[in-house]
Amino acid sequence: MKNNLKILRREKKLSQQELGQRLDVSRQTINAIEKGKFHPSLPLTIKIVRFFKKDLESIFLMDN
Amino acid sequence: MTKITHNGLWLDFSSLDKGDKKNYTLSSIFFFIAGGIAGFVTTANSYGDPIPATEMTIAGIICLLIGVFFWIKFYRAQDEMFKRFHDFAVTTGAYCFIVLGIIFHSLSLAGVIAEVVHQDVCFPLNFLFFGIGTLAGQVSFYKKHLS
């Protein structure tokens, strides 16, 4: 699964640390999600979607 | 939130907030005391002394339970990355405990080691397997998700 988190974060001019603080997770977690090395849980996914005010599938993209 | 460092073998204490620092420190202190007491009781047993039974043993168990209490408080305050890291490491430790434990005991290797060191090594050996598995799990998770 890929995602546009890095692009969206940069659009909002936030650092990984700042986004992590807004979402109540660590900078490492944001970094791992952006790199596609870690898939967030459903509650965190909902937090991300609500924070960026986007559709789920405009942030997270299934490979197939 | 906790920053995991050193290939998953350490955490950056300065990354913890005030409450996390308190819980982490207290759990570590109580685990350390419980470990010391367990070591004292085990050593006393291996030298054939009577078990300095109840008081020491009960004190050790109480310290262990207090350590667990503070560790759970610490764990609950962490984000999902740390929780998955923790759960993966502990699960790997449990697999190691079972698989290596079964192999060692089926081949009676524990008995061979016991004859060399002149004391029963069943529990310490299984505990060692758990520790090895946990460390392997920590490194493996770090390499896969955090490096």
Image (tube, coloured by chain):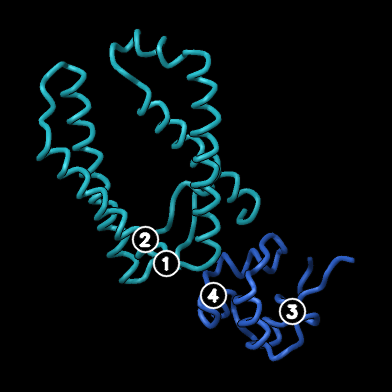
Chain colours: A blue, B cyan
- Up/down of B112 relative to A19, above or below: above
**Label 2 sits on residue:** B72
Image location of residue B57, percent across then percent down: 17, 38
Q: Chain of mark 4?
A: A
- A54 or B15: nearer the eye? A54
Check disc 4 and report the residue beneath it. Answer: A17
Circle 3 is placed at which residue position? A7
Spatial distance from mark 2 to mark 4, Cα to Cα? 25 Å
* In-image side of A2 versus B110 (left or right): right
State the CA–CA distance, disc 3 to disc 4. Answer: 15 Å
Mark 1 to mark 2 CA distance (whole Å): 6 Å
Give the answer, above or below, for where B107 lies relative to B71: above
Badge 3: residue crowd in 10 Å (few <14, some 14–19, many ≥20): few
Disc 2 residue crowd, few under 14, some 14–19, many 20+, Cα 10 Å: some
Residue drawn at point x = 40 percent, y = 33 percent: B127
Query: For the residue labelled by badge 1, is the local secondary structure a helix, a strand or a loop?
Result: helix
Mark 1 and 2 residues: CB-CB less than 8 Å, in contact? yes
Using the numbered discs, state the Cα–Cα distance from disc 4 to disc 1 in whole angstroms.
Answer: 21 Å
Estimate how packed mark 1 is, as few (under 14), some (14 to 19) or many (20 or more) residues with alpha carbons within 10 Å. Answer: few
Disc 3 and disc 1 in contact, CB within 8 angstroms = no
Horizontal and vertical percent position of residue B8: 51, 49
- Estimate the spatial distance between the alpha carbons at disc 3 and disc 1, rounded to whole Å: 31 Å
Residue type highlighted by circle 1: Arg
Q: Which residue is mark 1?
A: B76
Q: Residue at x 30, y 59 (%)?
A: B69
Between the residue at mark 2 and the residue at mark 3, the CA separation in whole angstroms equals 36 Å
Question: Which percent across, then down, holds residue A8?
Answer: 72, 82
